[in-house]
Image: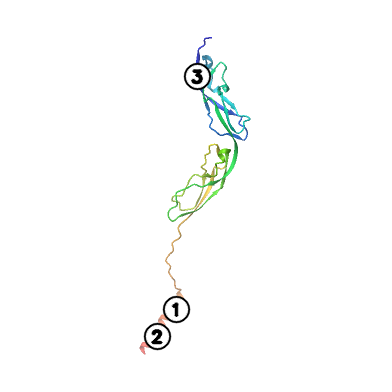
């Protein structure tokens, strides 16, 4: 009787348990609840913050939004203590079915090859990956992109592993997080050299003999 009363503030973890099989939480739910507790000083001194929590049971819930109010009644504290303030005072939990979807991968390219060189082809292995997560978000995912592949100054074809740049809110990549990208670069055409017509040695010899014979015949006619 007459024991002094006090009030303390705690950040209490919110535990969501028994998520139905094949479902997931698809909204922002606070991890901590701010609580003000008043009561006899001796009880408050013996209250360990590590032992205080708020538990919400999701067992048997259907897809959709469920509001959990009166969170103070879910706080595991001695009955002699009283909750004077709780923030937030309630939480909304949105449950969605977990689905999978196969989507194509697009290679993001930055930069261009030097003048005279040309990007001919870009190949990807695998060409598709699997995304898993909340059904509503998955409906809007139609493809994923890789991290940018820089082609600035590249003069030769190459192959490398490139990470997939996908960051979903309530969806994620399953399995492979990178793809093999093969880039084919075509260089400028080979320069054409000076075309010099070569005359076969035998033909050249015959031409010289014929020229010599004509010269001798001309001299004979002059002598006559």
Marks 1, 3: nearer the viewer: 3
Q: Which mark is residue 217?
A: 2
Q: Earlier in the sequence, mark 1 or mark 3?
A: 3
For the N terminus, the quadrant is top right
Q: Is residue 33 above or below residue 155?
A: above
Choose the circle earlier in sequence order: 2 or 1.
Answer: 1
Above or below: residue 193 compared with residue 18: below
How far apart marks 1 and 3 lie (CA) works out to: 120 Å
Does dot 1 land on a helix, a strand or a loop?
Answer: helix
Q: Secondary structure at mark 3?
A: strand
Q: Residues within 10 Å of mark 1 (few under 14, many from 20)?
A: few
State whether residue 173 appears in this view. no
| Residue to which mark 3 is pinned | 8
| Image disc number at residue 126 | none
Q: Residue at x 43, y 81 (%)?
A: 210
Residue that carries the numbered disc 1 in the rendered image: 206
Give the CA distance from mark 3 to mark 2: 134 Å
Residue 130 at what x, y percent from top left? Answer: 58, 42
């Amino acid at each position: 009787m007459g024991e002094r009363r006090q009030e303390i503030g705690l950040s209490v973890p919110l535990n969501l348990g028994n998520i139905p099989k094949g479902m997931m939480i698809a909204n922002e739910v606070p991890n901590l609840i701010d609580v003000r507790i008043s009561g006899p000083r001796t009880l408050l001194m013996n209250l360990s913050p590590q032992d205080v929590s708020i538990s919400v049971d999701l067992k048997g819930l259907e897809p959709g939004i469920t509001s959990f109010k009166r969170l103070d009644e879910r706080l595991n504290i001695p009955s002699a203590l009283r909750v004077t303030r709780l923030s937030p005072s309630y939480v909304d939990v949105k449950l969605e079915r977990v689905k999978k979807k196969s989507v194509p991968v697009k290679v993001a390219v930055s930069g261009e090859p030097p003048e005279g060189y040309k990007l001919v082809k870009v190949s990807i292995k695998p060409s598709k990956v699997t995304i898993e997560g909340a059904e509503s978000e998955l409906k809007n995912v139609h493809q994923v992109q890789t991290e940018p592949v820089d082609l600035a100054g590249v003069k030769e074809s190459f192959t490398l592993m490139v990470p997939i740049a996908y960051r979903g809110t309530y969806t994620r990549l399953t399995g492979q997080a990178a793809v093999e990208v093969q880039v084919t670069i075509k260089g400028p055409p080979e320069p054409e050299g000076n075309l010099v017509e070569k005359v076969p040695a035998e033909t050249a010899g015959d031409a010289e003999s014929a020229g010599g014979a004509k010269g001798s015949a001309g001299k004979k006619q002059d002598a006559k």
